[in-house]
Image (spheres, rainbow, N blue to C red):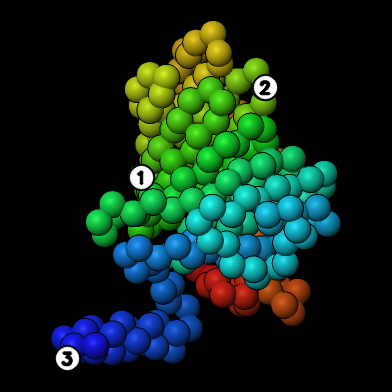
């Protein structure tokens, strides 16, 4: 290794050490990195590459997640934020790099539901049988069944890329089916709560001592940080 290479490697090691010592600092992604995040498993029927998933297990590009009845899984991104998948959901998760820019891709989602609170470093794209959507710095919910995909922008902006480009703002919802794209709906606060009501069955994971991360004084889940 050249002297310049050694200096760069030492800088990376030092940066990681500082992040770890700070405790609640998210490490983030290095360009080209294939590790996407860490799983928190809720329920008995969560599978990673057709094997039972373990709580805290790392997920890398190309891995397939599958949730069964009465089960959900959180994917906590290395840079903060998370994706949560409802029961009976079956995505493949990939990360694609374009130079130093990254995109987490949720591929082949044929059924189920997903909710994301923004990944501050990588944008996310979701591909279903009915189309593809992306976002950058927003909170959204996507529900898929054989008849349609329903996109809901809960905060920020959600963009349908195909079969036609359509932009959704906060509080708006759009359905996409094989016969076309529905009209944009503006949802009431009650309707927005109904969209994500499924998450009430699978609250955010607790710390190892049983305290909730969201509770005052609560401890964070393994590898994650409370606000």
Identify the residue at horizontal 21%, vertical 84% (top origin). Answer: 5
Report x, y in % for residue 205. Answer: 68, 64
Nearer the camera: disc 3 or disc 2: 3
Give whichever of discs 3 and 2 has the lower sequence position. Answer: 3
Please name the residue that numbered disc 2 is placed on. 146
Give whichever of discs 1 and 2 has the lower sequence position. Answer: 1
User: Can you say which quadrant of the picture contains the N terminus?
Assistant: bottom left
Please name the residue that numbered disc 1 is placed on. 136
Are circles 1 and 2 on residues that touch, CB within 8 Å? no
Q: Is residue 42 visible?
A: no
Density class for disc 3 (Cα within 10 Å; few <14, some 14-19, many ≥20) is few
Name the residue at the left extreme.
4
Q: Does 54 sit above or below residue 105? A: below
Report x, y in % for residue 46. Answer: 75, 54
Identify the residue at horizontal 55%, vertical 71% (top origin). Answer: 224
Density class for disc 2 (Cα within 10 Å; few <14, some 14-19, many ≥20) is few
Which labelled disc corresponds to residue 3? 3
Q: Does 90 sit above or below residue 161? A: below
CA gap between label 3 and label 2 equals 57 Å
**Element type where label 2 sits in the image:** loop
**Element type where label 3 sits in the image:** helix
Q: In the rendered view, does 25 fall on the left or right side of 63?
A: left
């Amino acid at each position: 290794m050249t002297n310049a290479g050694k200096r760069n490697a030492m800088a990376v090691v030092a940066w990681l050490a500082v992040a770890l010592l700070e405790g609640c600092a998210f490490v983030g992604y290095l360009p080209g990195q294939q590790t996407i995040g860490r799983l928190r498993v809720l329920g008995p029927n969560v599978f990673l590459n057709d094997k039972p998933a373990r709580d805290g297990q790392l997920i890398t590009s190309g891995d397939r997640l599958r949730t069964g009845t009465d089960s959900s899984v959180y994917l906590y991104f290395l840079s903060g934020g998370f994706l949560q998948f409802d029961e009976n959901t079956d995505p493949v998760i990939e990360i694609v790099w374009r130079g130093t820019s990254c995109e987490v891709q949720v591929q082949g989602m044929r059924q189920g539901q997903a909710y994301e609170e923004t990944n501050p470093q990588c944008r996310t794209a979701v591909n279903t049988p009915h189309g593809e959507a992306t976002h950058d710095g927003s909170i959204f919910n996507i529900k898929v069944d054989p008849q349609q995909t329903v996109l809901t922008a809960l905060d920020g902006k959600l963009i349908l890329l195909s079969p036609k480009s359509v932009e959704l703002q906060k509080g708006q919802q759009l359905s996409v089916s094989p016969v076309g794209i529905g009209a944009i709906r503006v949802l009431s606060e009650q309707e927005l709560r109904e969209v994500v009501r499924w998450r009430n069955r699978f609250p955010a994971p607790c710390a190892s001592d049983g305290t909730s991360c969201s509770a005052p004084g609560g401890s964070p889940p393994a590898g994650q940080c409370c606000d």
